[in-house]
Image (tube, coloured by chain):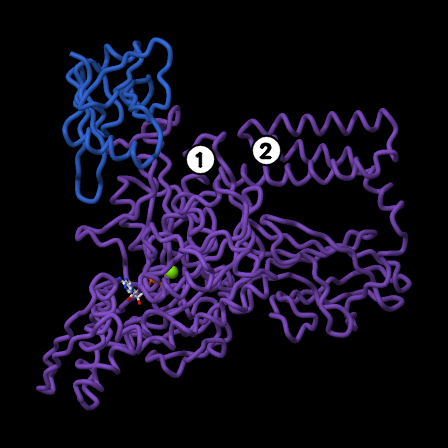
Amino acid sequence: MALLHIAEPGMSAEPHKHRLAAGIDLGTTNSLVATVRNGIAVCLPDEQGRTMVPSVVRYRTDGSIEVGQSAVRAHATDPKNTILSVKRLMGRGLRDVAHVEAMPYDFMDSDGMVRLRTVQGVKSPVEVSAEILRVLAARAEASLGGELTGVVITVPAYFDDAQRQATKDAATLAGLNVLRLLNEPTAAAVAYGLDNAAEGVYAVFDLGGGTFDLSILKLSRGIFEVLATNGDSALGGDDFDHRIFCWVLDRANIAPHSREDGRRLLMKAREAKELLTVCEEVPIKASLQSGEEVNLVLTRDEFAHITEHLVRKTLAPMRKVLRDAGLAPEDVKGVVMVGGATRMPHVQRAVAEFFDQEPLNNLDPDKVVALGAAIQANVLVGNRKDEDDWLLLDVIPLSLGLETMGGLVEKVIPRNATLPIARAQEFTTYKDGQTAMAFHVVQGERELVSDCRSLARFELRGIPPMVAGAARIRVTFQVDADGLLSVAAREMSSGVEASVLVKPSYGLSEHEIAEMLRQGMDHAGDDMTARALAEQRVEAGRVLEAIEQALAKDGELLDARERMQIDQSMAALRATLDGADHHAIRQAIDTLSRATDEFASRRMDKSIRGALAGRNINEIEV
Amino acid sequence: MGITLSDSAAKHVAGFIAKRGKGIGIRLGVRTSGCSGMAYKLEFVDEPEEGDLVFESHGLKVVVDPKSLPYIEGTELDFVREGLNEGFRFRNPNVKNECGCGESFNV
Ligand SMILES: Nc1ncnc2c1ncn2[C@@H]1O[C@H](COP(=O)(O)OP(=O)(O)O)[C@@H](O)[C@H]1O
Ligand SMILES: [Mg+2]
């Protein structure tokens, strides 16, 4: 029987039509699920009141799968089948994974993403992550008393296309409808309400279990831009545990130990670290299998002393990230603390000193990301009134472009462009009679293709033979709200076309996904109209703004009648924006763009002729 | 008779309003729809509307529009926990049959 929650004024849902939304922090160490209930974002606990689910999945011999706390316990005894930190493997080939040699898994090197051999067969990181998502979704559905309409899942700001796609695939496999992937630092900023706060630059300092991520966000007009990211993928709370562990071995003068003893001591070390956040000193006591006894006391000062070098490791990335963003510490308006490990007092102190201000830490640092995701999910399913609503836009983390002659990169969409976005660029043929062109799509900031990440290659064939420079090939890059890319090329005179949906090189193949879906899924999420609406509104805003600018600049190219027609189409589009019909908005955008076609081509003519010529793409022999 | 809140409902409502940071109370109401005719409304109130009836329970304002009142007169709003799920329930003496979902009913 459904229980009721207090809705915003005028927003009571029809019976049986509650739109249940959740935000998911799919973390390297811990994962959480949150929702907005009675107007407040809350993390959802299990029956024991625990909100965090350790991101650990164990495949058991009897065919069952354990996720979370119980799987953690099995790590020491069954390491090959107990997968930790799978997030590090998402969208990655074996060669891309740092410190593979230190991981106890039975890796299988395949062309695409790494695979792991377990007692239940070969598993991809996508499948492992899907198990974690299933547990979180089941908890949300039990807590909310119904099926989830959609979820927002967070990813690190630096996640590339392959890693984002892998995350989405995991959600699809778990039967979830992903409304949006959201950058973790952006989610944390939303949880603190910075999106309704004053405009400015914010730093997000995220020290998790095994990773350190720093982001500089700029907020303007409700849009968060990621100005720069930095960090250390091999620094986190676990390293502090390890330092205590070494300190214990040293002080208690004990020799190398059995695996079980090691595990016990590490657990004690972690407990001690977490307690030192609230206590001045903690006892560390353990009876080992070896018969040895540990009985020590660790003080906060001593702990700070033995881990000082770890805290110092965060300084260089902080300096670098600011340098990349072209900022000084005093330009930062607020610092958001994220990740359980930022609870450590000496970490807080170091950050406060560096930025010369107290960081924001009144929200639980291991919950902020999930809370922000829940707030965003609630907006995207349409549970809030429009007026006090904003649409949070994310940005492209790395520029997207094409390889041109000489192994150079021509950027088509610059980094930090807001999503969703479409950009087109025209290219031409290089040789007389050239009938085909090869396109190489790359991602990165560097000038040389070899320094960027290769995303996809495709060819356009059937170009009618012409003299060099006469063909007009329009290449359109389109990135949807989740940061996923499709690229299309079209020769304008003949209309021949070719396109790719960028299945990142380390993503799963179409076939693999289909196969996994067939096995594991019973319902595909419907496409959310809320998202379509949001996207169309954004698109409309962008179109209107662009035309306004063009009119201001080149309005004299139009006669009074033409001008009136454009003004009318603009007014018609504005009128649809108050409604909730995304088809109507789309139609109005199309009408407006037809009404401005002629204007656009006159403006083109006016601007420097021949600017189009001279850009060449590697030709291919056919 | 009016409308009342149980102790537990009052505690939660007060907490939610405080965390939300605004609102003078909650609105209880009904509207037609749902599988057995009527459905409950439960919302925060920022400003009462004209003609609204305002009750007080545990120091909290409970707002009801006059059309809804006959259907929920005497209701006690309760807050309950069922497994992981928790939320409000209308204890409404006027109800003849519910649709089993707790969201809609008949009088
Ligand atoms: N009170 C505390 N004091 C110090 N460290 C803590 C405390 N609570 C949690 N942590 C540490 O935070 C880390 C996990 O952070 P979390 O944000 O959950 O990770 P991730 O984002 O990598 O999934 C662990 O190393 C854990 O020991
Ligand atoms: Mg995290």
Confirm whether residue A521 shows in the render.
no
Q: Nearer the viewer, mark 1 or mark 2?
A: 1
Precedes in sequence: disc 1 or disc 2: 1
Residue at numbered disc 1 = A382
Viewport quadrant of the C terminus of chain A: bottom right
- Percent of width and height locating residue A405: 78, 71
- Percent of width and height locating residue A48: 17, 53
Disc 1 under 8 Å from ligand 2? The reply is no
Callout 2: SS? helix
- Apparent side of residue B10 relative to residue A586 in the rendered image (left or right): left
Viewport quadrant of the N terminus of chain A: top left
Q: Residue at x 10, y 83 (%)?
A: A293
- Apparent side of residue A170 relative to residue A552 in the rendered image (left or right): left
- Percent of width and height locating residue A61: 22, 72
The kind of residue on which mark 1 rests is: Gly
The image quadrant of residue A398 is bottom right
The image quadrant of residue A314 is bottom left
Q: Residue at x 32, y 17 (%)?
A: B31
The image quadrant of residue A117 is bottom left
Q: Do discs 1 and 2 belong to a common subunit?
A: yes
Circle count: 2
The kind of residue on which mark 2 rests is: His
Ligand 2, by image quadrant, is bottom left
Around disc 2, counting alpha carbons within 10 Å, would you say few (fewer than 14), some (14 to 19), or many (20 or more)? some
Callout 1: SS? loop
Q: Which mark is residue A583?
A: 2
**Chain letter, blue in picture:** B
